[in-house]
Image: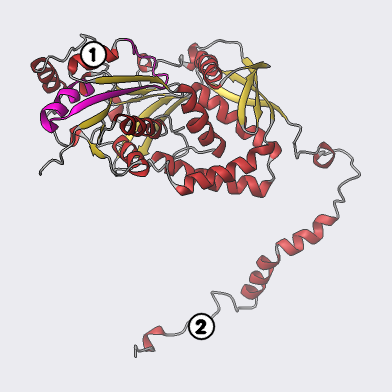
Amino acid sequence: MTKRKVSKVVLAYSGGLDTSCIVPWLIDNYKCEVITFTADLGQEEELAGLPEKAKVSGAIKSYVEDLRQEFLTDFVFPTMKAGAIYERQYLLGTSFARPLISKRMVEIAELEGADAIAHGATGKGNDQVRFELGVMALNPRLKVIAPWREWDIRSREDALEYATAHGVPVTATGKSKYSRDRNIWHLSHEGHILENPWMEPEEEMFLLTVAPEKSPDKPRYLEIDFKSGVPVRVDGVSHGPVELVTLLNQIGGENGVGRVDIVENRLVGIKSRGVYETPGGEILYTALRALETLCLDGMTMHYKDVVAEQYAEMVYNGKWFTPLRTALDAFVDSLMQNVTGTVRLKLYKGMCSVVGRKSPYSLYREDYATFGEDDVYNQSDAEGFIHLFGLPLKVKALLDIEGLGKSGLEQPDYTTFKRD
């Protein structure tokens, strides 16, 4: 297949072996200039020296930018407010990081006059879709280059040989047995023994959370304040988004909170097993759900659950930059205006339990809910309501009793009908 000619490419660059090899590969195969972009999303990797390494590999320029706050405020918190959880357990830590990276890469491409974007995602996973849908939505004129779908490198040994041949600096570090993705919201683990869904994860694999049985024997209580669905304080102390999530990751991790082991359905059609650590995320989701039970009426809360499932699938499938997602955000923001208050939680041995909640906008009325004597609820009113609520069931039962229900009706013989 003839390659479309490009002159300048912006590459999503981690500084690892694969993306380091991609720099000279792009130059050799596309005869183009390469600019690297590295997003600091809280992956806790050493980012110092990456521009120098990129330039030694052949890049003409390198960007390294701290996007942690934008990541939390514009991607994580809106998803959390929507209540989005993919397949009941996954808090979407990798999924919503990719559209942010795509967004900034497109901006840099436009700034630098580049005509292509490149990424190191494989042809077997979800990330290739998330990256490329972001580019298509924001600037479809940019070509997307995915080397893993083109090159002949198939193993770490192949990559090391290629790096050596092209003068790419490779740090001699021990490679993890697991494929990991980390940011300020979560840490994912895939591969190695996890490819067998029967195998229990090794305890040494976990990096953010202690084993629940080894966590403190004394419960840890904490209070989280929300304003319109956004967390703003922990134990009465105000924090910015980055500081707040970092603190909750620490507290949750120390108490063994936030581990999930899931077999999920990838967008590309295969199942994969992943183990996720999201200590701060589990705390925040648990607290916000509890506050919603006070502040949202039943019909609204139940419909919001329907929206949450749709929202989660869109985020997982890379459809962040869509009119529907934008519209759903407006819907959620409208609902969450009065979701303001405080939730008290108890963390103990891997469990995160709600033990108190309060809000100035609470719809809960103790005088209505009490089992004691009250003057606001006439219990005899329930009789008429039940008669009306159950009327369809009553009519159906009477038909059955009188022999006119399903079992008693004579069915027509459809074989006698002929097509005109």
Picture coordinates of residue 299, whole percent (x, y): 66, 50
Q: Is residue 21 left or right of residue 279?
A: left
Magenta extent: 19-48
Q: Is residue 45 left or right of residue 298?
A: left
Q: Residues within 10 Å of mark 1 (few under 14, many from 20)?
A: some
Q: Which residue is nearer to you in this view: 292 or 119?
A: 119
Residue under pointer 2: 410
Residue 53's disc number: 1
The residue sitting at 64% across, 70% down in the picture is 396
Residue 235's disc number: none
Picture coordinates of residue 297, whole percent (x, y): 69, 45
Q: Amino acid at mark 1?
A: Lys
Per the image, is 3 magenta? Answer: no
Q: Residues within 10 Å of mark 2 (few under 14, many from 20)?
A: few
Pointers 2 and 1 in contact (CB under 8 A)?
A: no
Tally of numbered discs: 2
Give the SS element for disc 2: loop
Q: Quadrant of the N terminus?
A: top left
Image quadrant in which you'd find residue 7: top left
Q: Up-down: is 311 above or below 259?
A: below
